[in-house]
Structure formats: C-alpha cells, structure tokens
Image (cartoon, grey):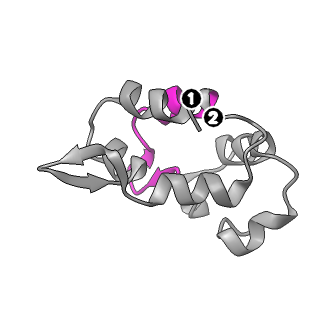
Amino acid sequence: MRTTPAGWHHWPSAEAWHKWCAERRPSSGAILFDRAGLLPGVETVLPRLNHELHLVAIYNWFTMPDPDLLVDDTPVSPRDWLRSGRSADTVAAIAGDL
C-alpha cells in the first residue's frame, strides 16, 4: 500500500498506520522517514498522537507549518522540525493536544 494521503482512506486507524510505518524501511517513502532512516525523535511523538485521528489529518499535521514551531521566526512543519534535530519533546507536546 502506498503512503500517500490518497491511499490512506483504506486504513482503519492511526494505530494501524503507526504499526505499518514502524515495520517499514526508509525506502517505503513514508513521511516518518528520510534518507537517513526514521526521523529523529519520531518515537517520542507517535505515542502522543490520538489513535482515533484520521490518517490524512496526521499526514497534514506532520507536513504543514505549525505556528508553534518557529525557526528564525518562520513556522515549520513537525517533520521539518524533527529532521533538523530540534527537540522531539516540543513536537510531542503539540501532538498530545491534537
């Protein structure tokens, strides 16, 4: 199964998506991976997400700029925040409020 938002409507829950991503290698193209492997700190963030969130909502949250995550006064996405090596605890706190 592809890891694009268009294909995610087939998945019953965020928990299923999390399990699937945890079993995949970086070549899967999942948003939680980059060329180096699993995004730094993502293991801190995922458990904080409500498992009832729609998968497209999770995709959007990970990939869209968040006003609480600022780099040089510019909002960045949780994915970019983690890729840059910044605190996973900051992203996890936001994830817990979704």
Q: Quadrant of residue 74?
A: bottom left
12, above or below 56, in the image: above
Asked if one can make out residue 9 in the rendered structure from this viewpoint, the answer is: yes
Image side of residue 86 versus residue 25, left or right: left
The tag earlier along the polypeptide, 1 or 2, is 2
Q: Quadrant of residue 9?
A: bottom right
Q: Secondary structure under badge 1?
A: helix
In the image: residue 68, left or right of residue 22:
left
Name which residue lies at 55% across and 61% down.
27
| Residue, disc 2 | 49
Residue at (30% x, 54% y) in the render: 76
Check contact, mark 1 vs mark 2: CB within 8 A.
yes
The single residue placed furthest to the left in the displayed view is 72
Outermost residue, bottom side = 6
Quadrant of the image containing the N terminus: bottom right
Give the tally of numbered discs: 2
Q: Which residue is mark 1?
A: 96
Name which residue type carries label 2.
Answer: Leu
Is-magenta flag for residue 45? yes
**Residue at coordinates 40% horizontally, 57% vertically from top-left?**
35
The numbered dot on residue 32 is none
Residue 71, percent across and down? Answer: 18, 48
Q: Where is residue 60, by image quadrant? A: bottom right
Magenta range: 32-47
Q: Is residue 14 depicted above or below 3 in this figure?
A: above
Q: Is residue 31 visible?
A: no
